[in-house]
Amino acid sequence: MNLNLIDKVVIVTGARSGIGLETAKMFLAEGACVLGVSRDMSPVTDLAFQDRWLTCEVDLGARGAGEVVADTALKAFGRIDVLFNNAGICPTRNGFLAVSDEDWAQTLNVNLMGYVRMARAVLPTMLAQKKGVLIHCGSEAGRMPHPLLPDYSTSKAAIALMSKALAREFTPKGVRSNVVAPAHIRTELWDRPGGFLHALAERYGTTIDGAVDAFLADSRLPAGRLGTARDVATAVVYLASDLSEFISGDVINIDGGVIPTT
């Protein structure tokens, strides 16, 4: 199937690892030019497709960061066709009352305002081209918040509404906006020390592997397994293609069947 992504220019934030890195690799395999963005891209500067792969190190929690990224893409490739807003943080908490004002501000600044900054920076170019695609990484937690992730869940709910606002304003001008909402995707955010699996292991009083089994049982995940970064990347690449040109303002759940459709 031809996705018509050859020579398209794609910005992927949070491209150092996990969903972002897998998505960047999939776009490259489809013939796109990709700018990978993160605070530290040193582990993945030497990907294949060097003529079409560029990295940019920037903190998207800082004002002006979006413009830095957009300018880098334009200088290197001359246009911007797709933005995949994916950079974010996922701090685990000991419940709502354990989250301070500073915690809330940090999570919303990176997870929500980082997306806002990037969308605001690329939209003028996309509007001038009369075509573009915005894709934002949300989460199942934005609809079904987890007690260990109160501020993260809230930020992901806000992303879904932001995308709908973008879609209503800019779809008539050729720029689509959608959200992919992964659930139970095992990436390094799950496995890192102090990450979600460690918090679950402590909560269940078991090992990491035992926490995975207990979590799958509790979530009643119909797929019977945790998802992979590739599961998400496939949906992102589809939404970036012309095959999805009638989809805008939507939230695509990538959840193994866990979220009710009603």
Image (cartoon, grey):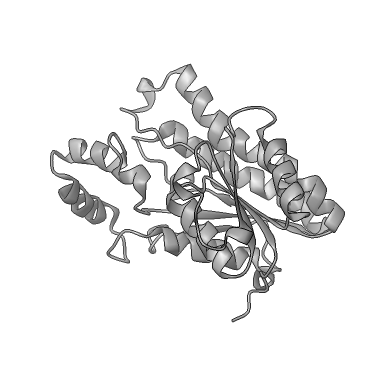
Q: Tell me which residue sits at (67%, 41%) in the image.
A: 69
Q: Residue furthest bottom?
A: 1
Q: Is residue 98 left or right of residue 81?
A: left
Please tell me whether residue 261 is drawn above or below residue 102 in the rendered image.
Answer: below
User: Farthest residue toward the right?
Assistant: 128
The residue that appears at 27% across and 43% down in the rendered structure is 197
In the image, residue 23 sits, relative to residue 142, either above or below, namely: below
Q: Is residue 37 left or right of residue 78?
A: left
Q: Is 108 drawn above or below residue 48 in the view shown?
A: above
Describe residue 169's horizontal placement relative to residue 96 as left or right: right
Give the quadrant of residue 206.
Answer: top left
Which percent across, then down, holds residue 143? 47, 47
Quarter of the image for the N terminus: give it.
bottom right
In the current view of this chain or complex, which residue is farthest to the top? 101
Viewer can see residue 146: yes
Q: Residue 118: which quarter of the image?
A: top right
Could you tell me which residue is drawn at 38 percent across and 63 percent down? 256
Q: Is residue 136 left or right of residue 149?
A: right
Residue 67, position as x, y percentages in the image: 72, 37
Rendered location of residue 130, percent (x, y): 84, 58
Q: Residue at x 78, y 54 (%)?
A: 78
